[in-house]
Amino acid sequence: MKILYFAWLREKIGVSFEEKEIKAVTVIGLIEELVLLDEKYSIAFSDLSFIRVAVDQKLIQDFKTSIKDAKEIAFFPPMTGG
Amino acid sequence: MAKEKIFCNLSISVQELDFDIQYEIDNIKRRKKNFGGLASFLGQVRDSAENDKTLLFLELEHYPDMTEKEITSICNDALGKWELHDIRVIHRVGKLIPGDNIVLVLATSSHREEAFKAVEFIMDFLKSRVPIWKKEHYENNSSWVKSKKSDEELLSRW
């Protein structure tokens, strides 16, 4: 699965994307799985109220959203466009 | 009898290049003469000298595969609410200095109210629903712009 990071999440994790074999079937499951891998993830995901998620380029509101058939998950802070 | 749905020209660009508001307006006027009004919003990089720090430049990062899709979806929502003839959105990304254009939203309609509302609606959603992030660079440091709670709260008015 392709996992993308943007803005300060990208800086904290140190890469803009990575390919990973993932066991998790939900967004929150994926975050928990990443956090166990390395401290940089636990720092980046320490406050989930600052985390926004897109599954296959669609914003999702619920962290329990399934990622079973997803190809691409993106994590980023609240958007500041305009 | 149901009102005939107007065909709306929808044009969206996400680009590093600058744009010219007059060129964009003329481009719409050349093609169509059947609208009564055009409303516009032009956003630029503010020269924010706070705490004795002078902003050198702003860096706009985005999610290339998603940005245009999200803007399109916002514009389609606007089309569901108001009868619009044209929507033109340009959002710049990359490095921008104070005074540089950031964003342009144009909307035309038969009557002014719909064009005004559409531009405001599109801008409200561009602020907090499109995957774009701003980073401010000063002489000795840089920081990511924090999203404003007030921007998020504005969405509920629609």
Image: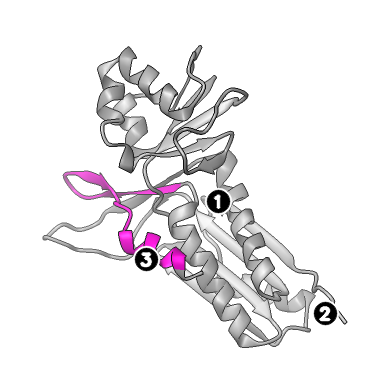
**Which is more N-terminal, label 3 or label 2?**
2
- In the figure, A78 relative to B50: above or below? above
Looking at the image, the residue that sits furthest to the front is A64
Q: Does B131 sit left or right of A33 as displayed? A: right
User: How many residues crowd mark 2 within 10 Å: few (<14), some (14–19), many (20+)?
Assistant: few
Q: Chain of mark 3?
A: B
Q: Is residue B126 visible?
A: yes
Q: Are marks 2 and 3 on the same chain?
A: yes
Q: CA distance from mark 1 to mark 3?
A: 17 Å
Q: Is residue B55 magenta?
A: no
Q: Which residues are magenta?
A: B132-156
Q: CA distance from mark 2 to mark 3?
A: 43 Å
From the image, tell me which residue sits under label 1. Answer: B15
The residue type indicated by label 2 comes to: Lys
Q: Residue drawn 45% across and 64% down?
A: B155
The residue type indicated by label 1 comes to: Gln
From the image, tell me which residue sits under label 3. Answer: B99
Q: Residue drawn 51% across and 33% down?
A: A65
From the image, tell me which residue sits under label 2. Answer: B3
The residue type indicated by label 3 comes to: Gly
Q: Is residue B152 magenta?
A: yes
**Of circles 1 and 2, which is in front?**
2
Looking at the image, the residue that sits furthest to the right is B1
Tell me where residue A34 sits by quadrant.
Answer: top left
